Amino acid sequence: MTEPGLDPQDPYVEWIAREARRPVELAPDLRARIMDAVRATPLPARPRRGLGWFTAPRPLALSPLTSSLLAAGLVGIGVFAGLTLTHRDGRSPAEQPVAVAAHPQLPGSDSVQVHEFVLQAPTASAVSLVGDFNDWSETATPMTRTADGKWVATVKLPVGRHVYAFVVDGATGAKWMPDPAALQAPDDGFGTPNSVVLVGHGNAT
Amino acid sequence: MTPRHLFRRGMAALLALGVTAPMLAGQGTDPLAKLDTASRRVVLALVDSANAEGLPTAPIVSKAQEGVSKHAAGPLIARVVRTVFLSLREARATLGEHANRDELTAGAAALQAGIPATALIDLRQAGHGKSITVPLVVLADLVSRGVPRDTASRAILQLWMGGAGEADLMGLSQSVGQDILSGAAPADALLSRARKVPIRLPPAKVPE
């Protein structure tokens, strides 16, 4: 079938047909060159979905086991938060005493006062304050040495009765001792005496 | 990575956090973590009992922490903590339901020092509603310094009935302590210093 108006015997048409029938000769490395060109072409960028990806609703299928584990995980996070925010003695972190670098005469709040502990121990290499206000931790409240051989720590304490002691590092190792300038607590049951401070009562020692 | 893979990995991470968080929290905040299992069980039972009876639990937990920090053996810690619990219970029975936390802990300490419960009752009655925390603490302090219990109880009661203030009592304790360190007999030091405490009787009770 030919286009209307075209004569198949026309020399020009015959030339075109001959050219079309001529077999095409391909270069032997053509395939390799094409593949190289394809590899060199960068991938098209993925369309940016932005916030829509997070907000678009999509169906979610969970097995009963996964659902149970997820629920347990969420409960665990809740327990973690609860334990972090509240101690077993019922005091929240806001009520826990904290060491401060403040002057002892600074006024405290109604329920918390700043108290300065002082120990004269010129030969000690380190002294720390331990008591019911820092969970009796030897590392929680290290005391600072002054030029005249005193060791000082300033601590915010809730109003009330507190029991404490000093841990003094000296030539014979760490030694627990009461505050010689304070009220004494009765036998602690563990063989090392403690001291008592009454915060908010008269002239607390 | 496909969104589905991302979601699955996120859920796995959330689950892992949720399951391990309580264990990590337990290690981080449990004040009794260093106690052996049996002693820890005793202490926790005492804490629960204190809770149930409306007693303060902080002194119980604190005593256990103190024992751990002082490297005491677990059974000893459990025994000492039990003594604290029983003292708190006795202090509550002696001082009444309205005793505040400081009075209870000071009363428990005084009882542990061997001061008789009758001395606590006398102080409570003589205080006319005032807090007796300071007299109790001073009393325990004097006994700890070697003053005989009866002598200390009588002297503090007389001063308290006579209107001595909290600062007077704490000053007395300090002075007696210094005298004892200087070589005075504890009872003599107390009686000598007690005579110098100014008594502030209410106007109606001032002798003619």
Image (spheres, rainbow, N blue to C red):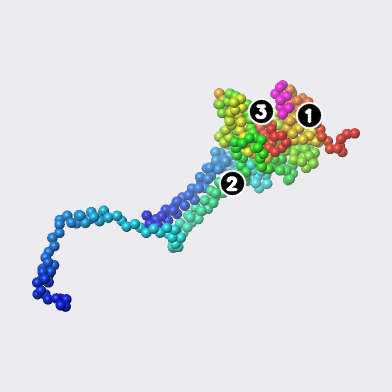
Q: Is residue A67 above or below residue B17?
A: below
In the image, residue A11 lies in the stretch drawn in magenta:
no
Asked if one can make out residue B4 in the rendered structure from this viewpoint, the answer is no
Label number found at residue A86: 2
- Subunit under mark 2: A
Residue stretch rendered in magenta on the structure: B174-183
As drawn, the residue found furthest toward the top would be B183
Q: Please tell me if label 1 and label 3 are on a single chain.
A: no
Q: Give the letter of the chain under mark 3.
A: A
The relative height of residue A147 versus residue A57 in the rendered view (above or below) is: above
The percent coordinates of residue B151 (x first, y second) are 77, 30
State the CA–CA distance, disc 2 to disc 3: 34 Å
Residue under the point 69% across and 36% down: A198
Name the amino acid type tagged 2: Thr
Residue positioned 16% across, 78% down in the render: A4
Q: Is residue B1 left or right of residue B196?
A: left
Residue at image x 77%, y 27%? B193
**Rendering quarter of residue A62:** bottom left
Q: Which residue is mark 3?
A: A180
Query: Is there any visible trace of residue B181 in the rendered image?
Result: yes
What's the residue type where badge 3 is placed? Pro
Which quarter of the picture shows residue B79? top right
